[in-house]
Amino acid sequence: MKEIQVITGCMFAGKTTELINRLKSTNKKYLLVKPALDTRDMENKICTHDGVFETGIQVKRLLDISKHLDDISVLGVDEAQFFDSPIIEDIREISSKGILIILAGLAKDYLNKPFGYMSKIIEMSNSVTWLKAKCHQCGLEATYSHRKQRDSESQVVIGDAEKYEALCENCFKKHVKS
């Protein structure tokens, strides 16, 4: 039976930490991947905002790891929002082999609009966990990712705390109006 789990929420909500914790708690052989587009960390490492590193593979699409599928029971996917449309078919194919897939990614972008194929991935999943962060301005619960500078209208601008912050609804609305 296919099992697809999604971990989502705004930036700095602990999605990667939760993904790594779930992978380790399965006590099964797993593989962790991230999109080639994500160049923030070392090529073969995935890093949490807490500074925890885990070995991972950078791929353009999930089926790039097809030679490893017979050796694993669980596939972890970080930054799932950055993958292109083949991710949907790749998830179907990999899960049909009985491999548990746990994906972490942003459901919404810096304008609070659907991000990449995450809406479709959420629809396909058996379970979705929504994580929250702490608002970087007022300290309340944050559910929004805010790009600090609008130097690009592109949905994808790779960055971390230097470019993004987690905001609560009220603080986010103040920035959207300005």
Image: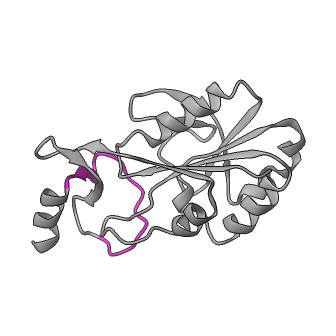
Total count of labels: 0
Viewed as shown, does residue 156 lie left or right of 124? Answer: left
Q: What residue is rendered at 13% in x and 59% in y? A: 170
139 w.r.t. 154: above or below: above
Residue 175: percent from left, percent from top? 14, 65
Residue 79: percent from left, percent from top? 53, 52
Residue 174: percent from left, percent from top? 10, 65
**Nearer to the camera, 121 or 77:** 121
| Most common secondary structure along the magenta stretch | loop
Q: What residue is rendered at 79% in x and 49% in y? A: 65
Q: What residue is rendered at 22% in x and 63% in y? A: 149
Segment tinted magenta in the rendering: 152-168
Instruction: Give the quarter of the figure containing the C terminus.
Output: bottom left
85 w.r.t. 63: above or below: below
**Nearer to the camera, 124 or 155:** 124
Quarter of the image where one finds residue 69 = top right
Q: Is residue 158 magenta?
A: yes
Q: What residue is rendered at 83% in x and 47% in y? A: 98
Residue 88: percent from left, percent from top? 68, 67
**Nearer to the camera, 49 or 121:** 121
138 w.r.t. 49: above or below: below
Q: How is the image coloured?
A: one colour
Q: Is residue 159 magenta?
A: yes
